[in-house]
Each structure stands twice: as C-alpha cells, then as structure tokens.
Amino acid sequence: MDYTQAPHLTDKEMDDFLKEAPTAIICSINEDNTIHGVPVWFKYESGQFIIATPEKSQKARNIAKNINVTLIVYVESPAIKGVIVYGKGEVDLKSWDQEAASMLEKYMSSEEAEKWWQILNEHAKWVKIVVKPERMASFDYAKDAVWDEMTNKMGWE
C-alpha cells in the first residue's frame, strides 16, 4: 500500500476552518533566500487573510521585497487538519485602526480588542499584511481510514 496524503477538506469545511483556526504560520523569504516562518493571529475574510505586524518586523520587510508567501494554518486536536496557502502578500502602510481592532475581536471581546490595539500602538507602528491566496491545499486526518488504522496500531486515540 502506498500512503500519500490525508483526505482534503471540502470548500465549506475549509472556509469554516479558516474563520475559526486560532493561528497561522506565515512564511516569507529572507534576503539570503532562507525561509522566515513565525506564528501570527489572523482574520480570514472575503477570501483573503489579514495580519497585523509591526512595520519593522522581519515578515513586513521580507514581503515588501518579495511578495511570495506561504501560510500554514493547522490544528492538532482531535486530529490534525489544516490548510496550506500559497499566495501573494502586500504590506499596507495606511492607518487601519478600526479594521485591526475588528481583527482582534476573533481573540477577545471588542472592548479588550480596542484596548489591546491602543497598547500595541504605544510600542510600535503597526501595519497590515494582506495575503491573497493563489492556491490552497488542505488535509484532514480525521477523515483518513489509513491514518486511523496506523494510529490504532500504536494505541493512539
């Protein structure tokens, strides 16, 4: 038997998953062509990803020079599932206070989001990264009978 990959998420499952998943890893390309990957909070809306970052962050500097990015969004429990996003990133330097606070509401109340955004801005100028997917691949091990069989042999649940 040749095992290749877990089954994919349906379009609706992927959309729902991306709206709820807590974090993503954004991967950008460093000047020496190595990959810079860091976890970020994000909001998935209208088919694109919105990420807040300090203007002088490595990811913002990298994307300003090379717009190719990969996002990896996954959860490990109860079974590993996720989405790999291949796309183009754009650093938007314009003020976006309302939208940023709205993005943070995925993680906290609107009052906390407003306060947190104010605190963040006391320490750095924050910018918006918009990632527009060109291609997405997904996986859901909960749907995978072969994976289930292999983990059962290990005594994992």
Image (cartoon, helix red, strand yellow):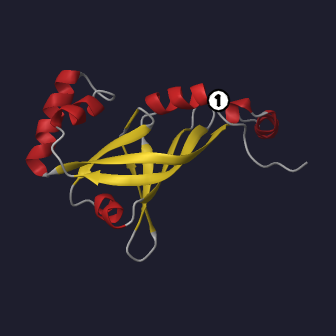
Q: Is residue 43 left or right of residue 4?
A: left
Q: Position of residue 87 (x, y in %)?
A: 48, 52
- Outermost left residue: 122
Considering every residue shown, the one lying at the far right of the view is 1
Question: In this rendering, does residue 157 appear at all?
Answer: no
- Judge from the rendering whether residue 16 lies leftward or rightward of residue 90; answer left or right: right
Residue 141 visible to the viewer:
yes
What's the residue type where badge 1 is placed?
Answer: Thr
Q: Is residue 156 left or right of residue 122?
A: right
User: What quarter of the picture does the C terminus occupy?
Assistant: top right
Residue appearing at x 42%, y 39% in the figure:
48
**Looking at the image, residue 122 lies above or below residue 31:** above
Residue 1: % across, % down: 91, 48
Camera-nearest residue between 55 and 41: 55
Disc 1 crowd rating (10 Å Cα; few below 14, some 14-19, many 20+) is few
The residue drawn where x is 45% and y is 29% is: 19
| Picture quadrant where residue 31 is located | bottom left
Q: Is residue 48 above or below residue 112?
A: below
- Name the foreground residue: 146 vs 52: 52
- Residue, x 43% and y 46% (percent of image)? 132
Q: Quadrant of residue 23?
A: top left
Residue 41 in the image, given as x and y percentages of width and height: 35, 41
Q: Is residue 64 above or below residue 108?
A: below
Secondary element at tag 1: loop
Q: In the rendered image of this protein, does residue 127 appear above or below residue 8?
A: below
Q: How many marks?
A: 1
Q: Where does residue 108 sit, x and y in percent of width and height? A: 28, 26
Residue furthest to the bottom? 32
Q: Which residue is mark 1?
A: 10
Q: Residue at x 60, y 30 (%)?
A: 11
